[in-house]
Amino acid sequence: DTALEHLRVIRGLMEKAMVYRAVTVPTALFGGLLAVVTATILFIVDSQLSSAVVASIWLCVFLVVNAFHHGLIFRTSQREGERYLSTGFNMAMKAILPAMFVGGVVGLALAFGPLQDIVGTSLAWATFYGLALMATSGFSPRSLRVLGLGFTLTGSILLGVHWWQAEGITLSSPPRTSAIIMGMTFGVFHLVYGLCVRSTQRSSSSTQF
């Protein structure tokens, strides 16, 4: 019975792929814009902020975007007469939480620990965030999985290069390098994803008339 229930839920989620896009696109655009603005400010300030301070700023950004996203989910569930903490929501959380938790712990350990490696923190967050998105492959649109793959490949490859080099990746200073990484991944990647999916949706809608 449990297996049949899971199959029913997965099928329902796959049928609602457009609903997931409708929720994730505004979040991607909002989060991407906020990440670009935050990264630009951190790059300009460049007052040799400590890794802990920079990481704390990005954690605040994450909380704001996360609240925005769950607000959209709640509004959608209310409009469609469904429970906010539905079976599908629980399955999605079970899929993404392991990677998000490990990535968060590794990133915080690098930023607040003795290494004070804010560049490594940024790359670890990008890598594990991508893995979290890819973990939803059973019930998410292909575009979201492609976005996850982009995060994972970019973060892991640059993280390997960063740790392979004796001094790591330092384009200017660690805070500025971190700002560039976060702005390009969590900022530009999300904006490109949101704009591309929105353009696809509009094209599909126009061909129906």
Image: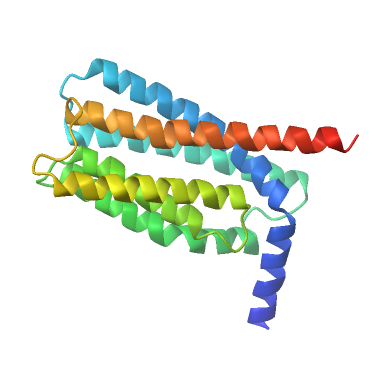
Q: Position of residue 166 (x, y in %)?
A: 8, 44
Q: Position of residue 207 (x, y in %)?
A: 85, 36
- For this view, does 16 lie left or right of residue 91? right
In the picture shown, does residue 188 fall above or below 7? above
Which residue is more in the foreground, 209 or 124? 209
Q: Is residue 124 visible?
A: no
Q: Quadrant of the N terminus?
A: bottom right
Which residue is more in the foreground, 25 or 166? 166
Residue drawn at point x = 39 percent, y = 51 percent: 152
Q: Quadrant of the C terminus?
A: top right
Figure quadrant of residue 50 = top left
In this picture the colour scheme is: rainbow
- The number of discs equals 0
Q: Position of residue 120 (x, y in %)?
A: 23, 44
Q: Position of residue 91 (x, y in %)?
A: 57, 64
Figure quadrant of residue 182 = top left
Residue drawn at point x = 70 percent, y = 37 percent: 200
Which residue is more in the foreground, 33 or 180? 180
Residue drawn at point x = 73 percent, y = 62 percent: 12
Which residue is more in the foreground, 75 or 181? 181
- For this view, does 29 lie left or right of residue 50? right
Q: Is residue 185 visible?
A: yes
Q: Residue furthest right?
A: 209
Residue drawn at point x = 35 percent, y = 20 percent: 40
In the picture shown, does residue 122 fall above or below 83? above
Q: Residue furthest top?
A: 44
